[in-house]
Image (cartoon, helix red, strand yellow):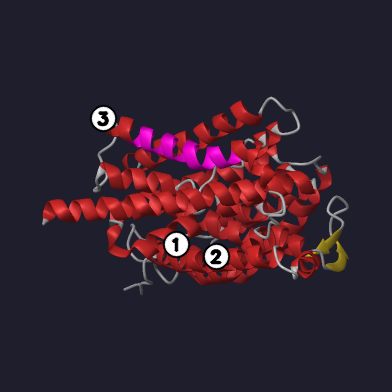
């Protein structure tokens, strides 16, 4: 009999909930430092250089670059592993299970982008930021659900996580297709050869994780030099990690994908994502006029209004048209979950950093992402508390 590990999905939700709370604390710390006499020290720390040049385009690798282009590749590796497992053997393995979160996620991607383009798309220099309000931050959103405890029913948690997973797939695709610099043909060929080697090892039955991780380091370096954002290497590596199906039950210890996924949950949730939040969330609020600019309004309204309206209306219509069964929750709870999907912290900041290079626009992006995400977190929390109290009153 094959030994079993605890369910990866349950561990994922648990670690994301705790990690989301840590992320909130770290983001608040970054904001305090950026707006205190320590602001210069905070800025100097992020730009501290190792002197190592891995890409002519990026120049010397700074602390921020090592985190955004290096450690975040591990974050994307975990995303890729989660996506591969869920689509192969998890909650998204069958079309009937994918239908509702896919419909909701697509609407939740499209409407924020449309709102952004309507408000800011008239300026060609701003149009490239259309994807900033498109993705949900799993850690932050699940962290808010963790604060709600039993007031958030399991169906809401699972629907939010599956929508966010599909969001991540779309965000990775958007980064690869729309935020790619001039490509280096030699590095692209190297990437292809490394992926072919990994796929061959997988096909040959090689399951030693160390071999694939060493291959992943080489793949990351080739991706960094290719002009494609280096974090895409994490997703590509996940696609070639061997996987033993466990028929949606707790994971088999012989599955390399399950072993790696379980090993990465805590480091990603408690170290990598908080470090990313720390170096990217520190925005100076010396001038809040940026929130009233087309760029600021497009991002904040895209997150706060676009995500909730897109996701809730899609779920409502899918259920009413009998395309999908209604989740085991009230419509008010589903609406509260939809509002929480407007928390776009990690991915929104990440895409913003790719879309804009000038300090002025980046500062506006950070202010707007924080404003839209905080508004979504507060309103979503209030709606779910109110929904639970109303239901308790009816039950009583």
Quickly name the residue at label 2: 23
**Spatial separation of the CA atoms under disc 3 and disc 1:** 30 Å
Q: Quadrant of the N terminus?
A: bottom left
Residue drawn at x 59%, y 56% as measured from the top left: 76
User: Is disc 3 surrounded by few (<14), some (14 to 19) or many (20+) residues within 10 Å?
Assistant: few
Chief secondary structure of the magenta span? helix
| Residue 320: image tag | 3
Residue drawn at x 61%, y 29% as measured from the top left: 119
> Is 85 located above or below residue 5 in the figure?
above
* Nearer-N-terminus badge (1/2): 2
Q: Which residues are magenta?
A: 299-315
Q: In x, y percent, where is residue 58? A: 83, 53
Residue drawn at x 43%, y 72% as measured from the top left: 253
Tags 1 and 2 touching, CB below 8 Å: yes
**Spatial separation of the CA atoms under disc 1 and disc 2:** 9 Å
Which mark's residue is nearer the viewer, 2 or 3?
A: 2
| Residue 143: image tag | 1
Whether residue 391 sits left or right of residue 247 in the image: it is: left
User: Is disc 2 surrounded by few (<14), some (14 to 19) or many (20+) residues within 10 Å?
Assistant: many
Q: In which image quadrant can residue 126 be found?
A: top right
- Residue 197: say if magenta: no
Q: In x, y percent, where is residue 134? A: 55, 41
Q: What SS does tag 1 mark? A: helix
Q: Nearer the viewer, residue 212 or 35?
A: 35
* Nearer-N-terminus badge (3/1): 1
């Amino acid at each position: 009999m094959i030994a079993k590990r605890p369910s990866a999905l349950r561990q994922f939700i648990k670690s994301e909930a705790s990690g989301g709370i840590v992320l909130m604390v770290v983001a608040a710390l970054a904001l305090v430092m950026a707006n205190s006499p320590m602001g210069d020290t905070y800025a100097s720390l992020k730009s501290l250089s190792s002197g190592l040049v891995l890409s002519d385009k990026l120049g010397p690798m700074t602390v921020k670059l090592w985190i955004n282009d290096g450690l975040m590749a591990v974050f994307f590796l975990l995303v890729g592993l989660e996506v591969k497992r869920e689509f192969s053997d998890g909650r998204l393995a069958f079309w009937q299970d994918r239908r509702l979160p896919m419909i909701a996620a697509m609407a939740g991607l499209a409407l924020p982008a449309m709102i952004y383009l309507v408000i800011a798309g008239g300026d060609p220099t701003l149009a490239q930021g259309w994807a900033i309000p498109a993705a949900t931050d799993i850690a932050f959103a699940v962290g808010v659900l963790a604060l709600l405890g039993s007031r958030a029913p399991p169906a809401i948690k699972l629907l939010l996580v599956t929508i966010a997973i599909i969001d991540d797939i779309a965000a990775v695709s958007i980064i690869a297709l729309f935020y790619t610099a001039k490509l280096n043909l030699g590095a692209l060929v190297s990437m292809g050869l490394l992926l072919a080697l990994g796929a061959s090892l997988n096909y040959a039955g090689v399951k030693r994780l160390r071999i694939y991780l060493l291959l992943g380091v080489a793949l990351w370096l080739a991706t960094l030099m290719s002009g494609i954002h280096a974090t895409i290497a994490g997703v590509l590596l996940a696609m070639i990690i061997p996987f033993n199906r466990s028929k949606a039950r707790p994971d088999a210890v012989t599955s390399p994908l399950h072993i790696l996924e379980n090993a990465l949950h805590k480091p990603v949730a408690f170290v990598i994502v908080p470090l990313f939040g720390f170096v990217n969330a520190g925005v100076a609020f010396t001038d809040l006029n940026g929130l009233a600019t087309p760029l600021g309004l497009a991002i904040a309204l895209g997150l706060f209004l676009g995500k909730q309206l897109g996701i809730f209306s899609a779920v409502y219509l899918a259920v009413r048209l009998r395309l999908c069964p209604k989740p085991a929750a009230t419509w008010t709870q589903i609406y509260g979950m939809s509002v929480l999907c407007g928390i776009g912290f990690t991915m929104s900041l990440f895409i913003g950093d790719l879309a804009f290079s000038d300090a002025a626009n980046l500062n506006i992006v950070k202010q707007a992402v924080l404003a839209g995400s905080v508004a979504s977190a507060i309103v979503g929390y209030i709606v779910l508390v109110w929904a639970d109290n109303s239901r308790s009153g009816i039950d009583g």
